[in-house]
Image: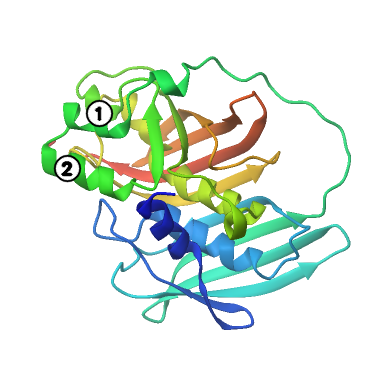
């Protein structure tokens, strides 16, 4: 296991302050605020620690309310909304400096048999044939920006199936993007629980989902400064079990952008073609004045 992955796992290992109150810290981000995927993953950790292991999360719905301060701890308060015979519901509020910065509702379900169907997995190149981030990013970004982005994503092996937004600046193309990802190391022993895999996928899901919005307009994004933006809301549905330390295909597209907002929707597939997760996110995507 890489040092960076160990650091991320430590980030997700929240301190329990009271029965339903947890405290987390933050890590360096590409922008001077807490990375949204981190807050969402930590909130899901907090909710999941109040639910029996036999009831994994099947969905979450979240709103980003204020930018997080990376230099201050985040307090997560869990509200036990419902404990039913099959479903459990939790609400989590993340607070900094006395103000809520994030709100999450999550639902958990005991396993049961039921109807089964799914769409077919889209075609995608094998992940091993794609360049690593360390090889690809310096080709398209200034050295200092590339290094900051590599440092921010060092716990994850994330590979673009096609050029990322900053690789095609000024050339609009189809509003669709694919990346393969997995953790930089195996998750074993105390890290083998299903909740952690869900939380790691939640963490990664906020990294690239709005890329497809940028592609439609030939924008390079936050890495090159030709747009400013932030996540507004985030929803995920967990359909089937998966492992975050095995290759997952993140197939993303944007059906709409308007009003200074862009919508991204995506599916996460296991390498053997099982539909594991559906993700939808809306974010602020604004062009700076003069650009």
Label 1 and label 2: CA atoms lie apart by 14 Å
* Residue positioned 19% across, 37% down in the render: 226
* Residue positioned 25% across, 53% down in the render: 31
Quarter occupied by residue 257: top left
Quarter occupied by residue 83: bottom right
Label 1: state its secondary structure.
helix
Of the 4 image quadrants, the one containing the C terminus is top left
Vertical relation: 134 (above or below) 71: above
Whether residue 285 sits left or right of residue 244 in the image: it is left
- Which residue is the site of mark 1? 135
Q: Position of residue 131 (x, y in %)?
A: 32, 24
Vertical relation: 105 (above or below) 126: below
Q: In this view of the protein, can residue 156 be seen by the observer?
A: yes
Q: Are marks 1 and 2 in contact (CB under 8 Å)?
A: no
- Which residue is the site of mark 2? 145
Q: Position of residue 63 (x, y in %)?
A: 50, 57
- Give whichever of discs 1 and 2 has the lower sequence position: 1
Vertical relation: 163 (above or below) 182: above
Q: Which mark is residue 49?
A: none
């Amino acid at each position: 296991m890489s040092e960076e992955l160990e650091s991320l796992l430590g980030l997700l290992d929240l301190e329990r302050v009271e029965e339903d109150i947890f405290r987390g810290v933050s890590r360096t981000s590409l922008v001077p605020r807490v990375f949204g995927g981190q807050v969402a993953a930590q909130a899901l950790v907090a909710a999941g620690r109040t639910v029996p292991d036999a009831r994994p999360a099947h969905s979450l719905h979240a709103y980003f309310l204020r930018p997080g301060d990376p230099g201050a701890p985040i307090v997560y308060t869990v509200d036990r909304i419902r404990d039913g015979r099959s479903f459990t519901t939790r609400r989590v509020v993340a607070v900094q400096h006395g103000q809520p910065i994030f709100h999450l509702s999550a639902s958990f379900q005991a396993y049961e048999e039921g109807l089964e169907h799914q769409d077919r997995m889209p075609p995608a190149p094998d992940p091993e044939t794609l360049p690593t981030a360390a090889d690809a990013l310096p080709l398209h970004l200034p050295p200092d920006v590339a290094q900051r982005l590599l440092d921010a994503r060092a716990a994850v092996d994330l590979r673009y199936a096609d050029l990322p937004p900053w690789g095609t600046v000024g050339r609009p193309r189809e509003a669709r993007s694919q990346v393969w990802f997995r953790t930089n190391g195996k998750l074993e022993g105390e890290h083998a629980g299903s909740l952690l895999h869900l939380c790691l996928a939640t963490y990664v899901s906020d990294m690239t989902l709005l890329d497809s919005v940028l592609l439609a307009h030939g924008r390079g994004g936050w890495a090159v400064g030709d747009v400013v933006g932030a996540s507004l809301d985030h929803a995920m549905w967990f359909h089937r079990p998966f492992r975050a330390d095995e290759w997952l295909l993140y197939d993303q597209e944007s059906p709409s952008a308007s009003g200074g907002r862009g919508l991204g929707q995506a599916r996460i597939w296991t390498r053997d073609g099982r539909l594991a997760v559906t993700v939808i996110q809306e974010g602020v995507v604004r062009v700076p004045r003069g650009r």
